[in-house]
Amino acid sequence: MKKLISVLLLTLGSVIVFAVAALALLFLVISPDRYKPAIESLFAQQTGLQLNIAGEIDWAFTPVFGLSMRDLRLTNGGSRSELASLSSIAIKIDPWALVDSRIEMQEFIASNLHINWLVDANGVSNWQTADNAATAPLAAPTASAEATEIAASIQQITVSNASLSIQDAQRGINTSFSNLNLTSQNTNLESRPFPFELSFNVADNTAGQAATVSIASNATIDYAAGNARFDNLMLKLNPLQFSGSLVAQDFHNNLSWSGSLASNTFPLSDFLDLYVREAADSALALPGDYSADSDQFSIQVEFNGNSQQINVPMLTLALDDMRLNADAAYTLGSGNAPANLRYNLASDVLDLNRYTSSPLEEPTLSSEEISPEEPAATVASAPAAPSQDTPLPIELLNSMNVQGTHRINTLALAGLTFTNVNVGLTVQNGVLNLDVPPVGFYNGQLTSTINLDTRQNPPSLNALGSIQNVNVAQLAQALPAARFAEGRFNLESLHTARGRTVNELLNSISGTSSFNLADNAIDISIIKQVFSSVSVLSPAGTGDLAQRWPDVVRFNTLEGHLILSGGIAQNQLLNVVMDNFEISANGGIDLPAESFNYDVLLTAFGEPAEQTVPVAPLYQGVGWPVVCNATFASEVSQYCGPDFSKVRDLFVQISRNEVQRRVQDAVTDQVPQDLQDAARGLLDRILR
């Protein structure tokens, strides 16, 4: 028995030694470089691209047993640039298949892959191969290539530290992907499910923004039929996580796709700060009492489409207790037919105050900071740098038709509140129409119609607006600049503008707005301040003209109009009548500097005008010069002040006129009739 066991062990040992020797002899006899032409030829036949294995092909024993290829380069006969490069690849193979001159690849490991994707200004990609057959015909397979059979039943794919550079001159895209890692198991294209994980860093080199993305799913791909399904799909873009599924069908011939995604609940401001807002704007994220607990956002979406259209039958956005429901359908243009977009938005309550600029806060300047002897111009800050101009989307409006509805019961925007919002938007043949039927606005309503015709050169804008019975006291709670008044405000306006950019429109806007304030109560402190300053320069004994005026006055009539001619920066004409007071102003607004500058005449009339605020005869019928020059953020009491140089001259002229009037009366009473003309002429020359 012992002898038999010894014989068996010796036989088994001999077999093992023989097998090892056979394998060693196989590796010595068979050179891996013999497979280089086969691999290159097969790749060219399948893709139309040229694979050049510049390095050697060696046997590999780690990380897997198989072939190791170094320094691979991918080129396109129609492009001079290198499409991709790869430092090394390890392919796990079945060693016994080598005996039959076959390569059966079972695992694929690649590292340091880099891909270049370039698109020129004409939209031609360096990867396009349509003309390759004419420009660089593929070499016929060599004898060794024909004699080698290559089969792929890949159990696992691992790609590490890959990178991708995308530069699209036509669309202005400059994006790079780095640290790209891909792993998959039981990989196949024969409709058997297999899992995969993909992660990468992406950077927008134009905007200077970066993000880390990861994708995982169970994929089922039937390449022959052109179908692919991704179940248990998970996409992570911190703090956003999407889960759902995606299906693509017949991608060889007539691609169609569908899917659904649902996100986690995450702080929206964190997402905006990371990927949308500039760093300088992050302070606007959560003003007031908002906190991270009241900024929770989520999204659900269903979609489907094909090569001609995209449909979103359900889109739900949730922000805290708010819900926005939407649906949309987009059809691509073809030939001379433009693209078409239809969408509907609906919400019960939508509070966007935390994400939009609010009305100006209460100013912080105190009266002690400004001398009462100086005009308000001293409070204006230095002009701000001009803001970048924004072009109108003229090409977009001419390339598509749009029909959209917006229904929101309560909308809070930029500190203001609107109710019963039902806005319609249409774009047809390059003409945009925005129709705003009556919208609730602080116990009143506003309506508007805006028409932008891009067919004209330059495009023209027409805007018609109306405000009716708005409660100014309630409005002032949201708009501090309105806190000087109470009453029911009414306005009618019609304006036109022309231009291709926002600044061109603002610099060309012309039109008229007429307004009135019924049942009013006006804080006239600024008018009292002007006349108190004027009184300082008045003749001795006159005293403070406005000392006994009330701070708040109710006028029977308060109405006026504003005329714009050639923009808002200058040449604005404002006229306001308040019983026996009239305000006339000429000036404009500097939006980049957030300031205004107006030359104002403040006139008080005597009877028969209703003497709501009594004014001494000396001040009646005189246009008192006032300068209103300040920043929007200045204290309201510092908006305006007298133009003292002109006021002094005005008092000199008033005194001269008064002396002349008295002399004329004396001449009339005491000089004979036949000498009165000569006496008046002599006195006129003396008084001059």
Image (spheres, rainbow, N blue to C red):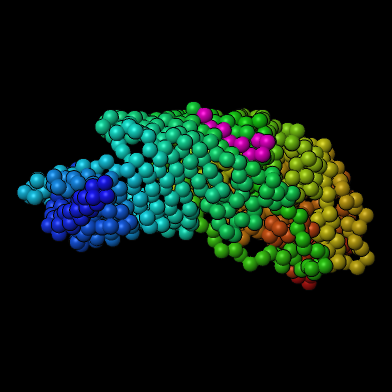
Residue displayed at 19% across by 46% down: 96
Residue 314 position in % (x across, y down): 52, 29
Q: Is residue 306 left or right of residue 463?
A: left
Range of the magenta residues? 314-322
For the question of whether residue 254 can be seen, the reply is: yes
Residue displayed at 93% across by 54% down: 548
Residue nearest the observer in this picture, 539 or 643: 643
In terms of image quadrants, where is residue 195? top left
Residue nearest the observer in this picture, 136 or 90: 90
User: Residue 315 lies in magenta, yes or no?
Assistant: yes
Residue displayed at 24% across by 42% down: 152
Residue farthest toward the top in the current orientation of the protein: 313
Q: Is residue 497 left or right of residue 38?
A: right
Residue 502 position in % (x across, y down): 51, 49
Question: Does residue 655 lie above or below 315 as drawn?
Answer: below
Residue nearest the observer in this picture, 212 or 33: 33
Residue displayed at 61% across by 56% down: 282
Residue 352 position in % (x across, y down): 64, 42
Question: Does residue 578 lie above or below 599 as drawn?
Answer: above
